[in-house]
């Protein structure tokens, strides 16, 4: 496997994009990425697209071909592959694109992620997002995605003394970070009181513990080291992208206080990148619900098991802290356009590493599918 | 890229499988493939699953994780990736699995394809299958998948004198072949008169020109050459798997009488496999509608452009003819379980090559998505 770098990034705004179609936002992000990489579309050799549920949101499958067509790349006939792993679809697309370049098969490949969610309304969107869990054994008996995360939160609170206030702090931090992100959905600060006073969706999870439903697209362009060096003075190298699976339904898992797939993917990623958790300078993690960010600290080895809440309480993951997490605003405040999120995390990590924010040299992204049956961990270095 | 072989094949029956769930048929095919390869599940390192529309057929996304879970492989935590390219999903899954082994990343990988269609009824199934075409520019104005293929057939008839009788002959041949296939949906012969007397769906396409909607699953196990030689005396080597894209909607294409993506993928596959069209001994092609098989003969170079109808008229693609096509019965008679079809084609090619039917040494599969915006061509050799 040869070295691979990210040479271009692009992203649409995340949010309720009533005036734009799915096709529009993918192209918007794609053009931005091509301009950033300073290459033309003809140099792209393959496309991988992460999309969770085009079938239900748009009544459109064959999303890879759609994007090849609307981006003008169908004329070249290049392969375009849609991958789906619920809201880890973007992370999986990034991984497949990375492997396609690392293996030597292609020199320049696009990884895209996109979802247009809000057109269907919140009720149907929750139904669709809940199809990331086990439909027969979870959703059919009433367990939506928030309800499943509520179970996880309850167990974590019981085992480790994690409080609703701790979860609220995650939301407060991520909202604060999003103020500086022009692409974010919610660019306003909130307080712990705001979170605690917001209505319960599934106790102990409240509205302001939950990522919104969002429209959005993100694109990264990957290239071999040789080509990356010609294209840019600031390549960001991909040290590892790993993926692991866990049982789909919570009932089959031995432990609800951690995401086993995240731990497995992280362990393998650290090994491949030849680093340890303490070497990570900055991270984008999957805070679809605030409890998931607290668990991510533990699963990724940023702290000991059970000490995630302590980390947020002590400000270690704030910008300026030991390991800034979700500088973008995370899923909570930047927005969660399901299939796009995993690629959006990479876009933000690359931006942070290029700009030298907090002198960061090593960044990590953790993207989960549903309640963690799929996890993708990416490690990038400048 | 190193050599890769198929070492195990498995398939559920194709048809209206009322008594079985999506999960059941995937596991059934998977167990058959593992037994055929004489390995245990623990030796599998990754899973690629082709599935077109789990979201709409099953209200279930996250299909990769579902299959890892139900096959018992989630315990190992191995990556499981769903890919989607309409009814080319299976072909794309086979290609990604092939690349994962060819690149040296993994030694043993599963490519699966599955779809459970019939539970939703025919009307919704046609709607869902039509989402493989351009929803905004084709289906919303009334063009279902059969209507789009009817346009293609009309142009082919006008340009090259292809007759409805010629298309009927494809159906008759494929039904005849399916009689010998225990996994096929329709194991009975039909006559040209039966086809011509069947009702029009979209003139000139009739019911008996059209592949049925089917439930079904297929699994192949791929291994590196080194491992394949230890596992089996009859490895079937993968000489090439190529994929190409075309414009999604017909209005954007310059020529409706051929599938440009199929031609591009075939050209590249022949080059990689270092063979020519005349070296192909047997083929499984994408006869979602009978006109597509006639065009496939031309696109794959089995005959000159415009002479596809002549090939079927002269019996060249019958078993015993120059190049037997769809010995399995094809999509028309074996059945078309959308996401499974591309993998099912490989299962049948491997069976034919192993058994030495018609002394075949080189087999080719052509899998199309929708009206051909995605094409995957695979070449296998014993």
Image (spheres, coloured by chain):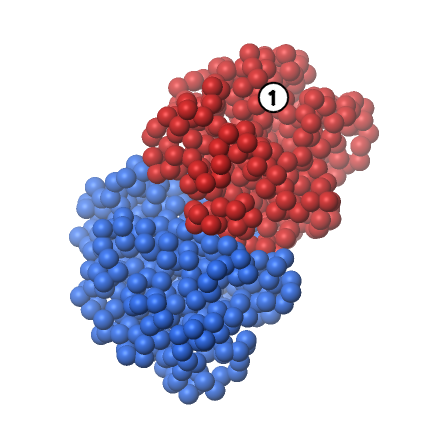
Chain colours: A red, B blue
Tell me where residue B104 appears, x and y as whole percent.
30, 36
Crowd rating for badge 1 (residues with CA inside 10 Å; few <14, some 14–19, many 20+): many
Give the left or right position of residue B267, taking residue B82 as reference.
Answer: left
Residue at 31%, 48% (x, y): give it: B222
In the image shown, does A70 or B289 lie closer to the viewer?
A70
> From what the image shows, is residue B244 above or below residue A288?
below
- The residue where tag 1 is placed is A325
Instruction: Kindly indicate the quadrant of the structure image that contains residue B352.
Output: bottom left
Tell me where residue B323 appears, x and y as whole percent.
25, 68
Which quadrant: the N terminus of chain B?
A: top left
In the image shown, does A70 or B281 lie closer to the viewer?
A70
Tell me where residue A369 appears, x and y as whole percent.
55, 39
Instruction: Kindly indicate the quadrant of the structure image that contains residue A213.
Output: top right
Which quadrant: the C terminus of chain B?
A: bottom left
Residue at 55%, 61% (x, y): give it: B251
Subunit bearing disc 1: A
Which element type, helix, strand or loop, lies under badge 1?
Answer: loop
Tell me where residue A260 appears, x and y as whole percent.
50, 32
Res B260 visible: yes
Residue at 55%, 70% (x, y): give it: B147
Instruction: Kindly indicate the quadrant of the structure image that contains residue B160.
Output: bottom left
Residue at 44%, 42% (x, y): give it: A46
In the image shown, does A287 or A309 lie closer to the viewer?
A287
> From what the image shows, is residue B274 above or below residue A175?
below
Res A87 visible: no
> From what the image shows, is residue A355 above or below residue A225?
above
């Amino acid at each position: 496997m040869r070295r691979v770098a990210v040479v271009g990034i692009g992203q649409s705004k995340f949010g309720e994009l009533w005036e734009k179609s799915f096709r529009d936002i993918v192209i918007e992000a794609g053009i931005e990425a091509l301009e950033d990489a300073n290459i033309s579309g003809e140099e792209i050799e393959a496309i991988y697209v992460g999309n969770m549920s085009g079938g239900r949101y748009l009544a459109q499958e064959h999303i890879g071909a759609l994007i090849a067509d609307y981006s003008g790349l169908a004329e070249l006939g290049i392969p375009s592959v849609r991958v789906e792993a619920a809201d880890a679809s973007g992370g999986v697309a990034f991984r497949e694109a990375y492997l396609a370049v690392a293996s030597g098969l292609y020199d320049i490949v696009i990884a895209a992620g996109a979802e247009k969610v809000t057109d269907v309304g919140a009720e149907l969107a929750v139904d669709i997002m809940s199809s990331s869990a086990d439909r027969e054994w979870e959703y059919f008996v009433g367990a939506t995605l928030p309800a499943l995360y509520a179970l996880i939160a309850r167990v974590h609170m019981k085992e480790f003394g994690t409080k609703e206030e701790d979860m609220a702090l995650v939301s407060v931090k991520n909202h604060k970070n999003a103020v500086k992100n022009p692409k974010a959905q919610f660019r306003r600060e909130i307080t712990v009181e705001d979170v605690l006073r917001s209505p319960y969706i599934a106790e102990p999870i409240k509205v302001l513990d939950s990522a919104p439903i969002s429209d959005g697209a993100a694109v990264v362009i990957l290239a071999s080291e040789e080509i990356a060096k010609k294209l840019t003075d600031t390549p960001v190298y991909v040290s590892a992208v790993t993926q692991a699976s866990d049982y789909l339904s919570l009932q089959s898992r031995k432990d609800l206080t951690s995401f086993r797939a995240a731990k497995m993917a992280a362990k393998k990623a650290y090994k491949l990148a030849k680093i340890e958790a303490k070497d990570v300078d900055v991270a984008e993690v999957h805070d679809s619900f605030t409890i998931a960010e607290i668990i991510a600290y533990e699963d990724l080895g940023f702290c000991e098991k059970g000490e995630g809440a302590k980390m947020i309480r002590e400000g270690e993951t704030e910008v300026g802290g030991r390991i800034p997490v979700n500088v973008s605003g995370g899923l909570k405040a930047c927005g969660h356009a399901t299939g796009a999120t995993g690629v959006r995390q990479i876009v933000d990590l690359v931006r942070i590493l290029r700009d030298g924010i907090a002198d960061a040299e090593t960044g990590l992204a953790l993207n989960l599918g549903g309640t963690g049956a799929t996890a993708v961990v990416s490690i990038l270095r400048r």
